[in-house]
Amino acid sequence: MTPAVRCSGVRHAFGETVAVDGLDLEIEPGEVFGLLGPNGAGKTTTIRMITTLLPVPSGTIEVLGRDVARQRTAVRRLIGYVPQQLSADGTLTGRENVALFARLYDLPRRTRAAQVTSVLEAVDLADVADRQAKTYSGGMVRRLELAQALVSAPRVLILDEPTVGLDPVAREGVWDRIEAVRSATGMTVLVTTHSMQEADEHCERVALMHRGRVRTVGSPAELKSALGPGATLDDVFRHHTGDDLAGDLENGGMRDVRATRRTARRVG
Amino acid sequence: MSAQLVVPPAVSAEPGPLDLVRTAVSRTLTMCLVELQKLRHDRTELVTRAVQPALWLLVFGQVFTRIRAIPTGSTPYLDFLAPGILAQSALFIAIFYGIQIIWERDAGVLSKLLVTPTPRIALVAAKAFAAGVRAVAQAVVVLLLALLLGVHLTANPLKYAGVVVALLLGSAFFCCMSITIAGLVLSRDRLMGIGQAITMPLFFASNALYPVQLMPGWLQVVNHINPLSYEVEALRGLLAGTPARLALDYGVLVAAATAMIVIASVLLPRLARS
C-alpha cells in the first residue's frame, strides 16, 4: 500500500543551521500520526516541506505517491492544513470563512453550500455559522479552521500544534472532532504537538524528532514498554532528547516561542 | 459526519497555461467577493478612509479654487483636483496591502492560502484586484462628496466603467508594489516606514494636484515614469473631460500592473518562508 507520507533522506538548512538532517519517515494511510520533539527539533520545517511551503533541497517527500517537489498542485489537492496560529478571518462569518476555502479548492457550485454546511455541522459550529468569527472563543476558532481544512475532503489532514493555547475543554473538543472525522472518512492525520499526554491518548503512532532526525518511531505503548515498566511518554521524550533541551531552544526555538505567544495572545 | 466528506478529491496534473489563466480569474473573483463581504460586515472603514480625501477636497480644493494659484485653464480647480484625489485615495488603500500580507503571514493566513491549489501568481492577482474593489467602493464615497461640492462630473455610464478599470489597474500596481517591498524587507515595521516614505512622494510627483507643465524639469521626468500620473490623466479625462491619452494611459497601467503582479508573485514564497 502506498504510504500517506514518505520522507527519504530529507535535509533542509537555513543558512548554517541544519533544521532537518536526513529525515526518513513513513506514515500509513488512515492513521493518526504524531510528530513530537522539542522546540527546534525540525517538526515545523518538516511540516512546511510536506505542505509545499518550503522547497525540498535534498531527499524526497511523497504524499500518497506524489512528489511534493514536482507535483505540487496535485499534493495540495490531497492535503488539508491547519497552521499553528489561529488564522480564521474574524471579520467574516464562520460560513464565509469555510466557503472561501471551498472556492479555493474548486468545489462545484451545486454542491458547495451543502458541503460547507456539512463540515460546519461536523465541527459543531452550524448554529453559530452566520456569526462573525471574531465573536468565537479560541476553541471555536480552532474548530472553524478544522472545517476550513476539511471542506475539500483532504486525504491527509496536517495539523501544526492544533491545541496550543487552548484550555483543556477546548482541547478535548478539537481532538473529538479530529477523531470523529478520521473514523468517518479514513483520512490520515499528521499532527505535531508538545503535549505528551495528547500524543499518548490520541495518536496511534508517534515519531520523536531531535536535532532534525527521527530518534524513535512506534505506538506510544511500544515506546513506553521499550523503556521499562511504568514509563510514560514524557520519560520517552526525556530519554531521547536528553540534556539538549536548553541548547535546542537557542537553536531556532525562538520563532516557535514567538508564534506560540502570538497564538496564546489571540486566544486570550 | 456527512457522507460527502468521504468523497476523495479529484487529483489533477500540474496546471498548464490555460488552467493557470482560468484559476487566476476564478481566484481573483473569489478574493474580490471576500473583500466585499468584509466591507459589508464593517462599513466603518469606508467612512474613516473617506476623511482624508474629504479634507483634500474640502480644505485644499476649495482654498486653491478661490485663490486661483494653480492655473488649470477652463476647468475649475476643484473639477481638476477631484480625479487626483480619487487616485490618491486608491493609492493609500493599495499601498498598505503589503502590511496586510505581513500580518497574514504572521497570523498563518498566508500559509493556509499557499497550501491551497492556487498558483502564486493567481494569489497575488487576486490580492491586487481585491485592493481595487476596496478602492472602487471608496471612490463611490469620494465621488458623492465631489458632487455635493459642486464638481462637474460626466453623466456617461461608459466613462464610469472606464473609471472603474483605471482604479482597478492602478490599485493592482500599487498593491503589488507594496507586496514586493514586503517580500524584500519581510518586516512590518520596516514596511510601514518605507510605505510612509514613498506614498507622499508618489502623490506629489504626479499630476494629481497640479498640471505637469508647472513642474520643474526633473519632476516632469519622475512624473512620466510614475504610473499614478497615467491613472490620474485617465480619470481626469473621463470624469472632467480634460485632454487625455487614454490608449497610452491604459496601456501603461496594464503593463505596469502585469509586471508588478509577476514580480510580487516571485517574491511571495520568500515572504512565506521567512
Image (tube, rainbow, N blue to C red):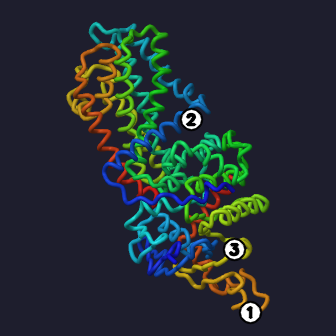
Residue A145 position (above or below residue B32): below
Which mark identifies residue A228? 1
User: Percent position (x, y) of residue B124?
Assistant: 41, 46
Task: Determine which residue is flagged by label 2.
Answer: B37
Disc 2 marks which amino acid?
Gln
User: Percent position (x, y) of residue A225?
Assistant: 72, 89
SS label for mark 1: loop
Say left or right for A142 vs B188: right
Which sits in the foreground, A186 or A204? A186
Determine the CA span between mark 2 and mark 1. 57 Å
- Pointer 1 indicates a residue of which chain? A
Using a 10 Å C-alpha cutoff, classify the residue at mark 2 as few (fewer than 14 neighbours), some (14 to 19) or many (20 or more). some
Which sits in the foreground, B266 or B68? B266
Disc 1 marks which amino acid?
Gly
**Residue found at x 78% / y 62%:** A168
- Pointer 3 indicates a residue of which chain? A
Task: Determine which residue is flagged by label 3.
Answer: A199
User: Percent position (x, y) of residue B233?
Assistant: 29, 23
Q: Earlier in the sequence, mark 3 or mark 1?
A: 3
Disc 3 marks which amino acid?
Ala
Determine the CA span between mark 2 and mark 3. 39 Å
Say left or right for B173 vs A122: left
Count of number-bearing discs: 3
SS label for mark 2: helix
Residue B250 shows in the view = yes
